[in-house]
């Protein structure tokens, strides 16, 4: 409808501002923390911050693509847990870590494929499917590893996953992440594939009529998400030197919250990877700073919640201001835009 | 254009086509299918363990489902409007504690329940106002309020807890009592469920919830007060979460700052299994209630069959997927059959 | 090639000890000790940490508490270890959610000169200086069986309702329970099942129901977790099994008061969590003061609580648990 | 329906000096309009002239920036669609606005269901009244069937029924006939005439000029948001009307060039999709425009969808230039040189939330690529080229297509597909909602494409269009191809006979 089209257009520009705003906010938080928070600026703390945020960031990459295409995967944390558990179990069997890792990655691919097939072949809603696999994968992890906690992975791997380059703030693991980030950014924002994802997310039917292989693309995305989730699972187990079936429990909500904070619209068709990653690190940095400032975990939860609500309210308010400004003449009834989740 | 109007329709009574009756049946079948799965499950369990359907067993089954049924009923109203409320678990937790705090000082149970419901309504209003006035995505807002309410709850509650010892005996007994195998709590849930279902089907504003979930834009053009309805749905959902909190207190006699943590996923699962679609506009509260019953019963069935609890989670997930997949496949099959049939009769 | 488990076997083993203890060194004042429980807002840990706070105040040192709001948020706990390291506390007392996950961070902390004491739930021995154990695992496991056996006249089927399958301390106790049951005097008692309620009220509830349905002849349940015993007691007290199926385990007097009084539970046991926290505080201060290093055989004085000796692998036992029943329960408030 | 004996000269509803802008676009400037009881009033204008905007202002969807709405001579402010409805104004919007999950009966009576005691809905009465409405429109739609899956035509019918159910004093219809074929249109006009007799005022928009002449008494023309004229239709010719709308004279409306047909480009053999169409075989040659006619629901769209691959077929074969296509794969069909301009532009043709540029670019994701990455410059110039060629009226190429008027959206869909340089072009209702001027443009374009050797299959419910443009006419009836009529023999009678199944 006409009016909502207008507000949509304004919202779009506000959205562009929003992921910029998250980025700016991140920089402000970092600068403030450097100057005012004791213990924040030193290299060790920064490497902690980055290292602890990496799992969320790793999963946020494919999750952003998935959400842009209008789907969601809530089973990522369970997939991560499962591959960690399998890694532990196989390690206990005496297999070499060099064989185990590819097996676990393959397992992630299978997990993602299962999600993808259920969504694309049966046409089931991904939210429902992945709530199911969230339980199923975690359950299988529990069956595989039971109550064991495997901790004795080889030191060179543990060191890679938790160590940093010399005395700098750069964890080793940041480098491969940056490569993956670059790949994801290019894939989403500069390739025909990425372009078509936006179309699929905004209108699946129109995309299909434009010859885009919607199902295949979604299948690929779910598979990649599974792969990245298992990579995260492996990283998690090594980073924390502990493979348990309940590794990374609840990580999916953190990822979703961060991605939402970065301005990715869960209706599909909108968002940028820059925004998503800024959202991830903004949450990570805030948590780090708040902990250093002795803000209790409970209050941190409230802050996260308030940020989330603001992340959607702020652009809305900005939109209203710009509509009001743009339109003394064009004062269209502000009752227009339909609400949708 | 010259019209060679070839009178396309007979002016006689349009017969109710066989196709439609089939459609009707299919729509009812969605709930029937869940019911069937549930019954099969119960029967199998009973064959494996004759204690399962003892009076105590039935009572337990009903009691276990009660709280989830209530919250799922409220949630499905919100989902029908194409929104979602992820904060129900937090609301349940904080309402339960509020009711408990009041009762601890030796309060009146009825007032305590009212207090919990009011608190739920309050949070429901907050969600509803944010979503409908702010016109912002419900998923984000309620994920935000999930955190906010949980945070406030834990700051307020701290490490305090309320145990059965602090509560009036009558209140706690009410939580587990009932008429033979039928607990009081289940009766409350049933009454709420039936009233809600009747309202949704037979009242204009109830139908409007479906309409605005089905096509928000068209709802606005049809003059439906969209914001008011969404606000009402959230408020109702909050109220039921609050009520569920009070019943939780009565049932478990124990609340702390973690009560209701992570409940949102269970509720969403129940609603989804019950056939309430996330894109809004369809599904029924009976379906959601059956979904809730099915999910909680799985958790009773597996231990009763002696399945090691290691397996429970995986089986739970697989059953959830099976439930929605089977439902979908049946729906697809019937749709194809319908189409062919239509063509032949068309 | 490749690296497998066998290649790394030789690593790890004993607790991290360094330097030499000087039992006569002065007790330092003005230290900061950070308590990091499995979960803040957990009544049990709050009581324990309060005990720690009290002890530290008496010793003239500073107390602080940080921690995740969920007992399964291991990564959260790791980042709190990092935070404490950043804040340069003198010592930290940690109840580990996971024996391995905290290791890297804890070692990092010890490298920075911070003394690490674990309490309630241990990590691997080389990741901390000492572990304060709530009671010897053996004593706990065996006494719970004895408690139940007395109530059952040494006859009947019994089951265990534990917390998470991964809970290290629970699993150790269960092992000792099984061992205790091998004694011929228990020949008429049979452990039919170990169920896991994941320290969640509702799950523990349903697990209890399941136990009773699956084993109609069940006579007794041991639940060595405060959440589990509470849920089981609440279920039993509202069901036909009240008083017929005996329940014991680890619970707090405040939680269990009602059930003891209404006859659902005869007796249960627990150590005093406040004492546990206090001992952890004393240990941390003793370590920082150089009075102990965590080696077996070292001794130190913990205020009114008396003198403690460090056992194998740096483990310090708090002592015997207290048994609560109708007679004495009103004397306790925690 | 209230019977008004005094169909006097006072307008029921009037607009006075209304202006409305969307950002920089001035959709309406100082437009006035009067609607009298007992009169059918036409609103004419090119795509984007502001007709729909005017209607939405009347209906309370938009609030005017300046000017007044007068109800029975009194200035009124409509705060929302509900206000206008309560004032007795019923509106059929250009795009159907149904609730897909609800039954047809509920769609029609949403918000106004007959009530029983205690405010409960009377489901029986709702059902019965819907049946009565359907009978009045002469269609056979089951009131209990959900609206999801209704064809565009059926959706439009439900919209009409909804508007009729109001017993409104003012009925406003924005292109209600665009999706309908002759027989439904005739029915609708019958109903409109009855309403007129009863004293209702009707405002009617259509790009089919003959319809305007057939039923309207006065006509108001808009051009670029400004009022051009408002006058009785008596004595006007189609050319007069077109001149007012377009501002110049138009050439021949159907400028079909005669082209020598080349070899077969698209060959469909015994194509069957169970329950939808059966045993459909035909060829389209290079340089040929083949019309596909039939009544609503005959299965034309379904054949096109299957050929293009968005639906799977159950049996048969489709060949392009002798190479057979994969079942259910639009991407291979596109690669083989096939293009489909779909019927439903909002759901299928366009991604409404994307810009004009990107919508047109969507079919060129393979061609506007350099080293695997998007070449934005190439994408933009490709989109600009085609938007200009098809005279799309827009403010900026980066605006979302949802801000365009209906007709301009249709042009974007055409641009999107013509930009692929297809060998075989299937157009499904290509000129639905397109104004006369542009329609001629589109026809010239199709004709030009054919002359350049493209094989064109044109599905249209607009019979004059089919007769004017097609070299051959294929006719479908109930999922089967019932006739193939060469241009020389194609007349309304022969086509309709085949379409209704009266002749083979
Ligand atoms: N919501 C909107 N935002 C921005 N521009 C709009 C909006 N709605 C309409 N317009 C613009 O207003 C002008 C008039 O549009 P309108 O839809 O009224 O045309 P129309 O006469 O109905 O055309 P058509 O015959 O194609 O339906 C067009 O230029 C259109 O792009
Ligand atoms: N998406 C759909 N779901 C279910 N039925 C449909 C759908 N689309 C069309 N139909 C039905 O299939 C039959 C064939 O429709 P189709 O659209 O192919 O006819 P058509 O000849 O192209 O007519 P139209 O003039 O409406 O385009 C009709 O009965 C129609 O109602
Ligand atoms: Mg229009
Ligand atoms: Mg069609």
Image (spheres, grey):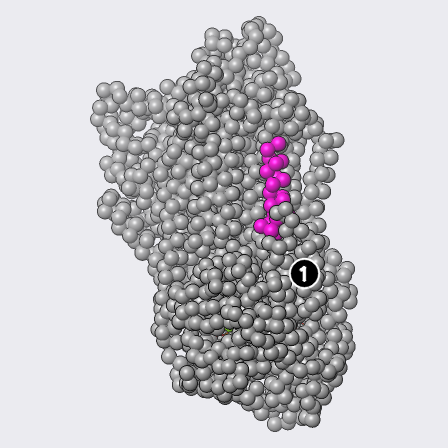
The residue range painted magenta reads: A175-195
- B247 or A14, nearer to the observer: A14
Asked which quadrant contains residue D200, the reply is bottom right
Chain ID, mark 1: D
Magenta stretch, main secondary structure, is: helix
Instruction: Locate residue D169, reporting x and y percent.
Output: 61, 84
Instruction: Name which residue lies at 44% across and 30% down.
Output: A100
Instruction: Locate residue C22, reporting x and y percent.
Output: 57, 5
Q: How many marks?
A: 1
Is residue C110 magenta-colored? Answer: no
- Indicate the quadrant containing the N terminus of chain D: top left, top right, bottom left or bottom right: bottom right
- Indicate the quadrant containing the C terminus of chain D: top left, top right, bottom left or bottom right: bottom left
The residue carrying pointer 1 sits among few (fewer than 14), some (14 to 19) or many (20 or more) residues within 10 Å by Cα, namely many
Answer with left or right where residue D50 lies relative to residue B185. right
- A10 or A174, nearer to the observer: A174
Instruction: Locate residue D81, reporting x and y percent.
Output: 62, 72
Instruction: Name which residue lies at 44% across and 12% down.
Output: C312
Instruction: Locate residue D83, reporting x and y percent.
Output: 63, 74
Please indicate, yes or no, whether residue C123 appears anywhere in the rendered image: no
Asked which quadrant contains residue D353, the reply is bottom right
Asked which quadrant contains residue B198, the reply is bottom left
- A162 shown above or below C129: below
Instruction: Name which residue lies at 23% across and 36% down.
Output: C217
Please indicate, yes or no, whether residue B39 appears anywhere in the rendered image: yes
Q: Is the residue at mark 1 in contact range of ligand 1, meaning its CB lies under 8 Å from it? A: no
């Amino acid at each position: 409808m006409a009016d909502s089209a207008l507000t949509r257009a304004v919202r779009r520009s506000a959205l562009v501002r929003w992921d910029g705003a998250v980025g700016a906010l991140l920089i402000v938080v970092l600068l403030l923390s450097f100057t005012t928070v004791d213990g924040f600026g030193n290299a060790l703390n920064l490497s902690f911050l980055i290292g602890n945020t990496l799992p969320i960031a790793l999963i946020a990459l494919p999750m952003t693509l998935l959400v842009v295409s209008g789907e969601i995967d809530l089973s990522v944390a369970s997939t991560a847990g499962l591959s960690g558990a399998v890694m532990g179990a196989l390690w206990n069997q005496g297999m070499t870590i060099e064989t185990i890792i590819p097996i676990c990655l393959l397992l992630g691919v299978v997990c993602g494929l299962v999600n993808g097939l259920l969504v694309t072949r049966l046409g089931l809603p991904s939210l429902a499917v992945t709530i199911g696999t969230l339980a199923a994968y975690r359950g299988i992890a529990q069956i595989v590893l039971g109550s064991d906690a495997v901790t004795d992975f080889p030191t060179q791997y543990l060191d890679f996953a938790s160590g940093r380059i010399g005395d700098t703030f750069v964890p080793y693991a940041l480098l491969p992440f940056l490569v993956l980030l670059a790949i994801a950014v290019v894939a989403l924002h500069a390739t025909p594939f990425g372009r078509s994802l936006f179309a699929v997310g905004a209108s699946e039917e129109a995309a299909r009529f434009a010859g885009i292989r919607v199902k295949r693309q979604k299948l690929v995305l779910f598979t990649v998400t599974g792969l990245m989730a298992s990579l995260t699972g492996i990283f998690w187990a090594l980073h924390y030197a502990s493979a348990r079936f309940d590794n990374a429990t609840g990580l999916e909500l953190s990822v979703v919250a961060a991605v939402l904070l970065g301005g990715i619209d869960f209706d599909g068709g909108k968002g940028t990877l820059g925004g998503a990653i800024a959202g991830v690190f903004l949450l990570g940095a805030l948590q780090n700073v708040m902990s250093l400032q002795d803000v209790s975990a409970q209050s941190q939860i409230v802050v996260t919640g308030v940020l989330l609500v603001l992340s959607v309210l702020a652009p809305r308010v900005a939109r209203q201001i710009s509509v009001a400004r743009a339109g003394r003449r064009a004062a269209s009834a502000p009752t227009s835009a339909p609400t949708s989740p | 254009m010259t019209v060679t109007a070839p009178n396309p329709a007979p002016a006689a009574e349009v017969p109710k086509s066989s196709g439609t009756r089939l459609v009707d049946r299919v729509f009812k079948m969605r709930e029937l299918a869940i019911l069937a799965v549930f019954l099969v499950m119960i029967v199998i369990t009973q064959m494996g363990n004759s204690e399962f359907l003892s009076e105590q067993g039935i009572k337990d089954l009903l009691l276990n489902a009660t709280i989830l049924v209530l919250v799922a009923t409220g949630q499905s109203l919100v989902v029908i409007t194409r929104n979602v409320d992820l904060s129900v678990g937090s609301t349940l937790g904080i309402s339960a504690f509020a009711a408990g705090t009041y009762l601890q000082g030796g309060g009146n149970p009825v007032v305590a329940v009212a207090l919990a419901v009011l608190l739920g309504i309050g949070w429901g209003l907050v969600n509803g106002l944010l979503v409908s006035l702010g016109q912002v995505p419900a998923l984000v807002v309620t994920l935000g309020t999930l955190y906010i309410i949980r945070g406030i709850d834990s700051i307020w509650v701290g490490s305090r807890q309320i145990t059965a010892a602090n509560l009036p005996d009558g209140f706690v007994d009410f939580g587990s009592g009932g008429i033979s195998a039928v607990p009081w709590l289940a009766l409350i849930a049933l009454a709420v469920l039936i009233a809600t279902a009747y309202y949704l089907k037979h009242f204009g504003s109830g139908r409007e919830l479906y309409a605005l979930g089905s096509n928000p834009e068209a709802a606005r053009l049809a003059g439906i007060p969209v914001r008011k309805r969404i606000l009402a749905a959230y408020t109702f959902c909050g109220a039921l979460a609050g009520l569920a909190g009070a019943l939780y207190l009565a049932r478990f006699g124990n609340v702390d700052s973690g009560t209701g943590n992570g409940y949102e996923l269970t509720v969403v699962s129940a609603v989804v299994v019950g056939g309430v679609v996330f894109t809004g506009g369809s599904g029924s509260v009976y379906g959601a209630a059956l979904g809730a019953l099915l999910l909680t019963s799985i958790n009773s069935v597996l231990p009763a069959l002696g399945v090691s609890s290691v397996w429970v989670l995986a089986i739970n997930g697989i059953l959830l997927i099976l439930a929605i997949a089977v439902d979908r496949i049946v729906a697809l099959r019937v749709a194809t059959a319908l189409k062919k049939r239509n063509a032949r009769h068309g | 090639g490749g690296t497998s488990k066998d290649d790394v076997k030789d690593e790890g083993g004993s607790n991290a000890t360094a330097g030499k203890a000087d039992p006569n060194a002065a007790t330092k004042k003005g230290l900061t000790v950070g308590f990091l429980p499995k979960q803040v807002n957990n009544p049990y840990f709050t009581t324990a940490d309060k005990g720690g706070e009290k002890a530290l105040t008496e010793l003239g040192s500073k107390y602080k508490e940080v921690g995740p709001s969920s007992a399964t948020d291991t990564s959260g706990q790791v980042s709190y270890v990092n935070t404490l390291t950043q804040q340069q506390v003198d010592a930290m007392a940690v109840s580990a959610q996971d024996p391995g996950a905290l290791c890297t961070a804890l070692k990092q902390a010890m490298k920075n000169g911070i003394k690490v004491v674990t309490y309630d739930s241990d990590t691997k021995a080389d990741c901390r200086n000492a572990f304060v154990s709530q009671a010897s695992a053996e004593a706990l496991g065996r006494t719970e069986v004895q408690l139940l056996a007395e109530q059952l006249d040494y006859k009947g089927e019994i089951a265990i309702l534990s917390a998470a399958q991964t809970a290290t301390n629970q699993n150790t106790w269960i092992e000792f329970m099984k061992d205790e049951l091998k004694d011929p005097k228990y020949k008429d008692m049979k452990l039919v099942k170990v169920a896991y309620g994941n320290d969640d009220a509702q799950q523990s509830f349903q697990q209890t129901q399941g136990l009773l349905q699956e084993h109609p002849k069940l006579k007794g349940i041991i639940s060595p977790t405060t959440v589990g015993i509470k849920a089981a007691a609440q279920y039993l007290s509202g069901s036909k099994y009240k008083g017929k199926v005996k329940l014991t385990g680890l619970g707090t007097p405040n939680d269990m008061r009602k059930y003891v009084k209404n006859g659902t539970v005869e007796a249960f046991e627990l150590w005093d969590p406040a004492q546990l926290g206090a001992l952890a505080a004393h240990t941390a201060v003793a370590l920082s003061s150089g009075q102990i290093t965590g080696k077996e055989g070292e001794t130190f004085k913990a205020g009114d609580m008396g003198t403690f000796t460090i056992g194998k692998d740096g483990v310090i036992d708090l002592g015997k648990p207290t048994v609560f029943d109708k007679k004495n329960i009103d004397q306790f408030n925690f | 329906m209230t019977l008004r004996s005094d169909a006097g000269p006072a307008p029921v509803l009037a607009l006075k000096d209304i202006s409305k802008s969307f950002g920089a676009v001035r959709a309406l400037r100082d437009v006035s309009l009067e609607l009298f009881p007992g009169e059918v009033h036409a609103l004419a204008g090119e795509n984007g002239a502001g007709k729909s905007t005017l209607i939405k202002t009347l209906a309370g969807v938009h609030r005017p920036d300046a000017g007044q709405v007068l109800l029975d001579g009194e200035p009124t402010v409509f705060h929302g669609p509900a206000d206008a409805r309560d004032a007795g104004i019923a509106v059929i919007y250009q795009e159907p606005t149904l609730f897909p999950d609800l039954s047809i009966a509920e769609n029609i009576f949403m918000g106004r269901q007959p009530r029983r005691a205690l405010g409960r809905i009377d489901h029986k009465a709702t059902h019965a009244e819907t049946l009565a409405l359907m009978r009045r429109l002469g269609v056979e739609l089951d009131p209990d069937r959900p609206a999801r899956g209704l064809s565009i035509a059926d959706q439009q019918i439900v919209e009409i029924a909804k508007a009729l159910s109001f017993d409104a004093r003012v009925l406003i219809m924005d292109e209600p006939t665009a999706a309908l074929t002759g027989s439904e249109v005739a029915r609708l006009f019958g109903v409109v005439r009855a309403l007129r007799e009863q004293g209702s005022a009707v405002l009617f928009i259509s790009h089919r000029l003959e319809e305007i002449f057939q039923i309207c008494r006065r006509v108001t023309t808009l051009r670029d948001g400004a009022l051009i004229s408002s006058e009785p239709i008596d004595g006007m010719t189609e050319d007069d009307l077109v001149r007012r709308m377009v501002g110049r004279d138009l050439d021949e409306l159907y400028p079909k060039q005669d082209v020598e047909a080349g070899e077969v480009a698209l060959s469909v053999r015994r194509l069957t999709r169970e329950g939808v169409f059966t045993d459909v075989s035909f060829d389209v040659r290079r340089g040929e425009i083949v019309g596909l006619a039939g009544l609503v629901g005959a299965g034309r769209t379904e054949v096109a969808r299957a050929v293009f691959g968005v639906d799977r077929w159950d049996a048969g074969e489709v060949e392009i230039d002798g190479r057979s296509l994969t079942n259910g794969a639009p991407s291979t069909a596109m690669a083989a040189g096939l293009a489909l301009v779909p019927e439903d532009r909002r759901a299928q043709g366009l991604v409404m939330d994307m810009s004009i540029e990107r919508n047109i670019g969507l079919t060129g994701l393979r061609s506007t690529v350099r080293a695997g990455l998007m070449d934005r410059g190439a994408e933009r110039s490709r989109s600009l080229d085609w938007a200009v060629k098809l005279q799309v009226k827009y403010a900026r190429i980066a605006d979302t297509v949802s801000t365009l008027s209906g007709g301009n959206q249709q042009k974007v869909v055409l641009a999107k597909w013509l930009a692929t340089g297809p060998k075989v072009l299937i157009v499904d209702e290509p000129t639905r909602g397109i104004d006369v001027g542009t329609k001629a443009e589109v026809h010239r374009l199709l004709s030009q494409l054919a002359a350049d050797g493209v094989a064109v299959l044109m599905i249209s419910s607009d019979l004059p269009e089919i007769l004017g443009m097609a070299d051959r006419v294929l006719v479908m009836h109930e999922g089967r191809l019932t006739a193939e009529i060469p241009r020389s023999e194609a007349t309304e009678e022969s086509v309709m006979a085949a379409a209704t199944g009266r002749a083979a």
